[in-house]
Image (tube, rainbow, N blue to C red):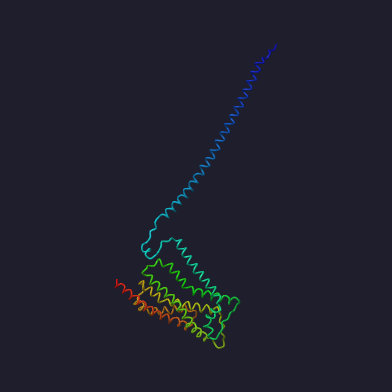
Amino acid sequence: MAKEKDPKNVKKKKSVVKSKGKKESTDSKIKSTKKKNAVEKSQPQSTDTEKDKKKPEKNLIEALIKEADEDANTNSDEEVEVDPDALRRGDKPMNIVDHLDEFRSRLLIVLVTIIVLTVLGFYFSDILLDAINKPFLESGYKLNIFNLVEGFVLRIKASFIMGLLIGLPLLVYHVWQYIKPAIDIDNRKFAVYSIAAAVILFYAGLSATYFYLLPLSIKVLLSFTPPDMENMINASKYFNFAILFAVAIGITFEMPIIIMILTRIGIVSPSFLISKRKYAIVLIWIFAAVITPTTDPLTLTLVAVPLMLLYELSIVISKFIVIRKKRKELSQ
């Protein structure tokens, strides 16, 4: 007879199987939780490594910013060494940006003034052109325009030249104010007189050209035209000739000022100018031949003779400067 199974043993076996299943399930749960914890631990480590990589970059940037701020503060706090001679002549310590700012502001004032004067000159362009053309019209001839735009261009040129001539003192004033702090107080008076005399001589050269040299040269040049030919002078070419001729004579009238400055510095002396007079005369004629718009000998003579007179005047001024310098030395 087969043995009957004891129900208690069956229950025990079932309980043992259940306990084993529970243990296996708990073990699997524990393993899964361990895996999760391992994954979670590994993830922050990776993020921490990324943060650690980014930290040095941020630290470098912050360090550079701090160094730049410290340099700026130290530069602002540092005392600028000031030359006592500069303070005595009113030369305030300025950096490059301040100098450029001052230069820009003065340049803008001059440019705006010239533009305004040019606009006003265009309004009075008829009067300006009549005044410029008068030396030629007195010869009995008329000027000619050969294209449609030439009349407008002539008005623009005349108005711009008027703006420059009227605005020249303002330009000289702002240049002087810009460089004045760099000039010693003892030499400022001489510099002011030299600049004022240079401007006056330039205008004197323009006036001499307009009232004397230009009309005379026009009459002489027109007299060379053969009787069987007719003069057809272009208005633009005449305008350019008159302006260049006047400016060239105005610049040559600056010779006494140049000699005076060279004598004051000590480069030139009256004895040197007198001993080199013959060489100077040759150079004057060569210079006159270069600056004269035409190649005729009469215009060359009209330019060279005043330059020779200016050279003799420069010798007199040089002697005066030397005598005055010696008196100052003796008084000291």
| View extreme (top): residue | 1
Tell me how many marks there are. Answer: 0
Quadrant location of the N terminus in the rendered image: top right
Residue 169's x, y, as percent? 46, 73
Q: Compared with residue 80, is residue 36 higher up or lower down, i.e. above or below? A: above
- Above or below residue 75? Residue 271 is below
Q: Which is nearer the eye, 74 or 321?
A: 74
The image quadrant of residue 284 is bottom left
Residue 28: x percent and y percent? Answer: 60, 28
Residue found at the very far right of the displayed protein: 1
**Image quadrant occupied by the C terminus:** bottom left
Could you say where residue 202 lies in the image, as x and y percent from the top left?
Answer: 45, 76
* Residue 91, x across and y down, in percent: 40, 64
Residue farthest toward the bottom in the current orientation of the protein = 227
Above or below: residue 224 compared with residue 76: below
